[in-house]
Image (spheres, rainbow, N blue to C red):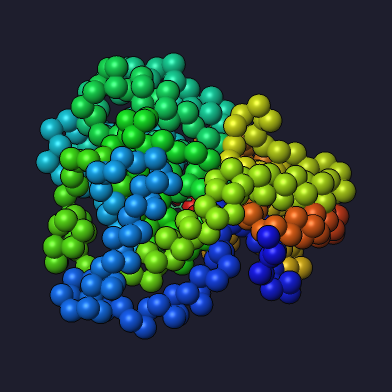
Amino acid sequence: MPSERNPTSPINCDANGTFGLVPGVCAAVAEESASWGNPSSVHQAGQRARAVIEEARDAVREIVGAGPRDAVVWTSGATEANNLALRGFAQGALRKVIVSSPFEHPSVLETVRHLGDHDGWSIRLLPVLGHELSLEKLAEIIDGAGIISVMLANNETGVIYPIRSIVREIRKINPSAMIHVDAVQGVSRIPIAMAEWGVDAITLSGHKIGGLQGGGALVLRSGVLVEPEMTGGAQEEGMRAGTQPVAAIYSIHYALRWIAQHGGVAGRAARMVANRKAFLEGVGKAGRVEPTVAPMIPTVPNTVSLRVPGVAADFLVVAADLHGVLLSSGSACSSGTQRPSPVLLSAGLSQEVARETVRVSVTDDPDTERFYQAGAIVAECIERLKGRASCSHGKEGSVGSMS
Ligand code: PLP
């Protein structure tokens, strides 16, 4: 399989931020979109667009292991899908208790907090054991809950949470709770079995799998409904008003077909594993680089969270960028305030360690050698930066966010 990436473009080791487009998607969108009308219009152009969004629903059901009658509600992305799930379930709920985890993406955690602050919901967060969720007190926590939202894989550390076991335990104690899973970082990287697991709603995002930005979906178990968040037209069975983002939806379908034609989820995962390994070999030259997640904890195949002692992560991200390698740190550095990643702090890392931790998240580009080069470039940056301070060791902020 040839790589179609421009060899002078940066090496994307920040795929959890945006994956980058699968080869050919832009040309296909440019060609096809000229004939699309509004999918709600009855004329032929409208019906061509309608066909695009209908055909793509099946591909989405397949990649998340949904049943044939489960609904796919198109949204502008995962942030909207997470909001739609949580706020949509919350409206009219009788039991105003919501359970989540401290590792969630801000689009879940901030929505949960908002429900607590403004709508009188009680919030319970699952306790953690380092990077993992502690399920010891699960029964106690989920008893009486109306909504439970737990992510499938963490965007910063790559840690996979045991959704199948979690759902099994929840159903024993609280069969009527609505269970939502933010599967953004798991889709196309690990197998997902929504119907088998018994999940009510799953979120995914197009630009995390090789599609365009601006499209995502909330998949709902057959018969499950959410109250719409926006008033407007009756699109998406009345659950999401507004013209669907047809180009982004087409790109999701295109990306899913591309993945299927190139070895499926297992093929993509194998290429990612090779690229992550190559990066780690390249960066190994820098001496002490420490994965923050123990090797026995399962992670998605493309992600590794690395601590570089003595090197501020935000400096390393900038230095690597200047040399053509995209990385990410969990901190937000603005107005002289550096806020270490709340996810890493929740996992028990100290402020110092969190500030020295970068996220490496590779793509499945077949040019594995490039990831070795990326690692080697980052190793050189580390050598130059060793001992330099971060942009600020001042005040702590509230919620940092990493996509
Ligand atoms: N959930 C997770 C786990 C993510 O990593 C992201 C990425 O930013 C989102 C939700 C939000 O996705 P989107 O950019 O599609 O709104």
Residue 317, image x, y percentages: 68, 59
Q: Left or right: where does residue 100 sit relative to residue 268?
A: left
207 in relation to 343, above or below? below
Residue 157, image x, y percentages: 59, 41
Q: In front here: 307 or 191?
A: 191
Write the residue at 38% across / 51% down.
Answer: 60
Q: Quadrant of residue 66?
A: top left
Q: In front here: 108 or 183?
A: 183
Write the residue at 54% across / 66% down.
Answer: 21
373 in relation to 34, above or below? above
Q: In front here: 325 or 310?
A: 325
Q: Quadrant of residue 347?
A: top right
Total marks placed: 0
Q: Left or right: where does residue 186 sit relative to residue 198?
A: right
Residue 381, image x, y percentages: 81, 59
207 in relation to 139, above or below? below
Residue 386, image x, y percentages: 82, 52
Write the residue at 56% across / 31% down.
Answer: 131
Is there any visible trace of residue 138 in the rendered image?
yes
88 in relation to 238, above or below? above
Q: Left or right: where does residue 164 sit relative to residue 271?
A: left
Is there any visible trace of residue 126 in the rendered image?
no
User: In the rendered image, which quarter contains the N terminus?
Assistant: bottom right
Q: In front here: 19 or 385?
A: 19
Write the residue at 67% across / 69% down.
Answer: 5
